[in-house]
Image: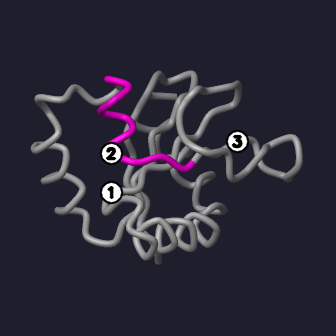
Amino acid sequence: MTKAEQLAQLQTELNGYKTALAKAADTIKENNISEYPIFIFHQHTFDAGIPIIDRAETKGNWSVNASSLEELTTKQIIQPDKTSEFIGVITSHGTDLCLFVLSELGANFIFLPRI
């Protein structure tokens, strides 16, 4: 299976999380926490964000932490000099959910349509 096929399969698997993520993204924005929520998908521990889904307590394969562009920039996961460029990418995706996925494919930013 090619990396593109693996990413497509991963994106299909992540679709099951849309409803919970959309609610969390709206809450983050409505409470003025960040205009740029980012959800970290991982299968081990990850020291960023606030845990919102624990794979040990759900039927899914992923744990999810709610984070933001600001936090990921502070922790230098996103380089500070790339922040403006990243805002442009997020904005160009409209209402899509921004995911930072840590998997066997490495660390990838994926945009998941809400619909």
Label 2 packing within 10 angstroms: few (<14), some (14-19), many (20+): many
Drawn side of residue 51 relative to residue 9, left or right:
right
Q: What residue sits right under mark 2 in the picture?
A: 69
| Residue 30 located within the stretch drawn in magenta | no
Residue 74 belongs to the span the image colors magenta: yes
Choose the circle earlier in sequence order: 3 or 2: 3
In the image, farthest residue toward the right: 57
Secondary structure of residue under mark 3: strand
Do the residues bearing badges 3 and 2 touch, measured as CB atoms within 8 Å? no
Under mark 3, the amino acid is: Ser
Q: Indicate left or right for 86 with 70 as reference.
A: left
Q: Does the residue at mark 1 contact the one at mark 2 (Cβ under 8 Å)?
A: yes
Taking the image as shown, residue 93 lies to the left or right of residue 49, namely left
On the image, the x and y values in percent for residue 67 come to 48, 46
Please report the residue visible at 52 percent of the width from the left and 72 percent of the height from the top: 27
The earlier-in-sequence mark between 3 and 1 is 1
What distance separates the C-alpha of mark 3 from that of mark 2? 19 Å
Q: Which residue is mark 1?
A: 36
Residue 63 position within the rendered picture, expressed as x and y whole percent measured from the top left: 70, 42
| Residue corresponding to mark 3 | 63
Please name which of the two marks, 3 or 2, marks the residue nearer to the observer: 2
Above or below, 83 against 44 in this view is below
Distance between mark 1 and mark 2 Cα atoms: 6 Å
The numbered disc on residue 77 is none
Q: Which residues are magenta?
A: 66-76
How far apart, in angstroms, are the residues tagged by discs 3 and 1? 20 Å
Residue located 14% across and 33% down the image = 82
The crowd level at tag 3 (other Cα within 10 Å; few <14, some 14-19, many 20+) is many
Q: Secondary structure at mark 2?
A: helix
* In front of the other: 25 or 70: 70
